[in-house]
């Protein structure tokens, strides 16, 4: 049995989490094997408004005790701390649990309307690894404004932080290579301008030298933004500083048409948190309009991570079944998310993916 701490959060985070728990229940009864004991905990902006606490100590403790964390989305524009900053407990969780690798896989799904007209865009299949415990986000809560004239935020790059996230990217590339995929690791930085970024690249290259079987290179972040739009099918695994990774991951989601197909995992040496790459989407919250697929694919990443860490190949079977069910639903046109101009809201999308599970299970076996 695995204990899963579920933090639905705010806005569409709550809606896609509910959909995901239904999907996991259906997958469990279809595939059998380990039991996932999912327990929901309070955290987020709405909880802060009610209680004055964004991330209660009991919730953090439950995350520490659990085998994995399933996270919706948190934050709400109108609910802020007294200093005007937003409620973003996911950043606190990343720091508290040392979730240093933000893993954001992006691939194109047959059946979705294409954003890029080039035929080769069907082959988009890359992973962005975002460093999540330092970089420019180190400045959060530390920035200063002097005399209402000048403002400063400091970027922190450490040898230890860059080494562990680069090692993670190379291990991930090795797993891709083992599955027959191309697996070059690209360091994304601004080494031509900043000492911190030149240091980031230097450490990356030291790590690369320890992985001679995996190809590697480096690109400046501005050039990478262009490459991502011009020929994203050439990209495999990228590793970037926190802020660059933040920006590039939204661009990456845009390449496949929206946030609703972009899953993510926040991984550390001990803990793993799985959440869609999107936020709480206040503009569509409460209207049954959210595409739950990013959440479903994040749950599949959680199952893969549990399977890996606990030698539970059956959970890998669940992950492939969920992925295949999403793929088949879109490819067959059984349901098209509103985000892509279709008519399916969260509930309809969820019903369609659950209905696709039995065939997906047979195909994935
Ligand atoms: P954050 O800063 O927390 O990432 P945000 O407000 O910048 O949040 P999102 O909440 O991800 O960004 O929303 C960006 C846009 O994408 C919004 O227009 C939102 O409606 C849309 N969007 C995000 N997720 C989904 C989804 N699952 N389905 C449909 N549309 C979505």
Image (tube, helix red, strand yellow):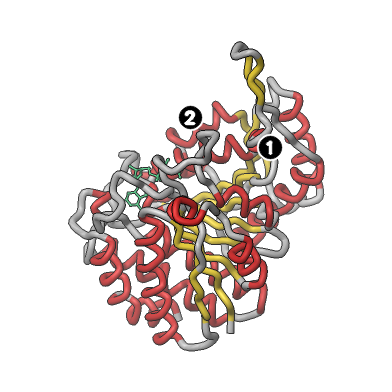
Q: Is residue 333 left or right of residue 274?
A: left
* Quarter of the figure that contains the C terminus: bottom left
* Horizontal and vertical percent position of residue 23: 38, 74
Q: Which residue is mark 2?
A: 226
Q: Which mark is residue 138?
A: 1
**Of 18 and 236, which appears nearest the observer?**
18
* Horizontal and vertical percent position of residue 169: 67, 51
| Quarter holding ligand 1 | top left
* Horizontal and vertical percent position of residue 89: 56, 51
**Of 295 and 75, which appears nearest the observer?**
75
- Note whether residue 296 is visible: yes
Circle nearer the N terminus (1, 2): 1
User: What residue is shown at x 59% (from left), y 56% (from top)?
Assistant: 266
User: What residue is shown at x 61% (from left), y 66% (from top)?
Assistant: 58
Q: Residues within 10 Å of mark 1 (few under 14, many from 20)?
A: some
CA gap, disc 1 and disc 2: 27 Å
């Amino acid at each position: 049995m695995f204990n899963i701490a579920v933090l639905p959060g705010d806005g569409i985070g709550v809606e896609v989490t509910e959909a995901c728990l239904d999907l996991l229940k259906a997958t469990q009864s279809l595939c059998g094997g380990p039991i996932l004991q999912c327990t929901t905990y309070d955290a987020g902006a709405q909880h802060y408004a009610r209680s004055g606490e964004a991330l209660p100590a009991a919730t953090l403790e439950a995350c520490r005790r659990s085998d994995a964390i399933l996270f919706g989305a948190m934050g709400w524009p109108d609910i802020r701390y007294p200093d005007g900053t937003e409620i973003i407990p996911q950043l606190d969780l990343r720091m508290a649990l040392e979730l240093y690798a933000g893993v954001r896989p992006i691939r194109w799904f047959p059946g979705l309307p294409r954003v890029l007209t080039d035929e080769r865009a069907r082959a988009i299949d890359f992973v962005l690894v975002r460093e999540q415990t330092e970089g420019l986000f180190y400045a959060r809560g530390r920035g200063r404004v002097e005399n209402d004239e000048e403002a400063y935020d400091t970027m922190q790059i450490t040898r230890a932080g860059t080494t562990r996230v680069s090692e993670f990217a190379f291990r991930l590339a090795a797993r891709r290579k083992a599955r027959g995929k191309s697996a070059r690791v690209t360091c994304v930085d601004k080494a031509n301008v900043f000492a911190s970024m030149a240091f980031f690249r230097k450490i990356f290259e030291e790590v690369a030298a320890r992985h001679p079987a995996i190809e590697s290179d480096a690109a400046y972040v501005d050039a990478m933004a262009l490459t991502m739009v011009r020929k994203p099918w050439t990209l495999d695994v990228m590793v970037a500083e926190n802020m660059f990774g933040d920006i590039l991951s939204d661009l990456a989601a845009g390449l496949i048409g929206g946030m609703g197909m972009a899953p993510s995992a926040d991984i550390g040496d001990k803990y793993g948190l799985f959440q869609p790459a999107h936020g709480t989407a206040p503009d569509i919250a409460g209207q049954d309009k959210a595409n739950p697929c990013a959440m479903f694919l994040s749950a599949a990443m959680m199952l893969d991570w549990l399977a890996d860490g606990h030698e539970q190949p059956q959970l890998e079977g669940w992950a492939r079944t969920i992925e295949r069910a999403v793929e088949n639903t879109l490819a067959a046109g059984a349901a098209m998310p509103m985000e892509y101009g279709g008519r399916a809201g969260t509930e309809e999308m969820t019903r369609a993916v659950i209905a696709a599970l039995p065939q997906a299970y047979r195909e994935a076996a």
